[in-house]
Amino acid sequence: MNHGGSSGGTSQNPFLRGLIDSHCHLDDEAFAPDRSAVIQRAKNAGIDKILVPAYSPALWPRLHHLCAQQPMLYPAYGVHPLYINACASDWLEQLRGLLDQAVAVGEIGLDLSENAPDYGSQVACLKMQLHLAQELNLPVILHARRTLEALSQILRDFPGLRGVVHSFSGSLVQAQRLVDRGFYLGLGGAFTHARALRLRATIQSLPLEQILVETDAPWQSAESYRGQRNEPAFLLETVHALARLLQMSPQALAEQLTHNTLALFQEKL
């Protein structure tokens, strides 16, 4: 399988032309030494737009500068639940000031992992950001580590809000609830064969129109890329894996995925 290296250009993979990476932390310091090469490999793989969410106010200026230098990068600003304790008192006003140039509010959500901040503080921070997204008519990029049920309950108070739950790994019932609300499901990152099998019933039962593909974080487990750094060009593997799972051509799938991403983020891309 081609991992999207410099030899894997669009002439070899024409079905990927125009594909959008809906979630990649390309501002991460892990990419600093060769970010230009990573972006070039993405272009060679046919990817021409990459959405980059920033986790916290400390990272917003770096992402703003990076996107100003790289036209194919599109920023999303938000406070991740694991970073809410580091926020200054004026973070909400800082966020509001950046969102006129953003494609979404994100990455935001809830997290129940070990050492996560107080859950009540997470909920309060999330609701403030959801209100802001609703006010500005922006989609949201949601993080839901073991919190899909709680997140679904909160979203009931925000009718009309649109967005994507990235790195989705929930049940078919949970997926259907989100889809019924008009939300999308982000697949990718550590999209291994084992994960594909676990999600087979869910993916095959969902409308293809509600799926996005993503890189997610730069580092994945040994199970996924054997400890290698993940990067946007690896979406080639994700598209092939999904196409096999759905028994359709990679070209048709890539065209649908691009349409989905443009439909969610609308005029922002």
Image (cartoon, rainbow, N blue to C red):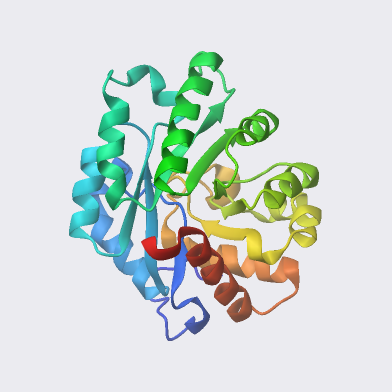
Which quadrant of the view contains residue 120? Answer: top right
Between 36 and 173, the one nearer to me in the picture:
173
Residue 126 in picture, x, y percent from top left: 49, 28
Q: How many marks?
A: 0
- Quick check: can you spot residue 87? yes
Residue 262, above or below 113: below
Residue 179 left/right relative to 62? right
Residue at image coords 38%, 37%: 78
Above or below, 105 relative to 112: below
Q: Quadrant of the C terminus?
A: bottom left
Q: Position of residue 168 (x, y in %)?
A: 63, 46
On screen, residue 58 above or below 162: above
Is 30 above or below relative to 215? Answer: above
Residue 173's x, y, as percent?
A: 80, 44
For the N terminus, which image quadrant? bottom right
Q: Nearer the viewer, residue 211 or 160?
A: 160
- Front residue (pair 268, 160): 160
Residue at 47% of width from left, 57% of height from top? 22
Q: Residue at x 69, y 52 (%)?
A: 179
Quadrant of the image occupied by residue 159? top right
Whole-percent x and y of residue 131? 46, 34
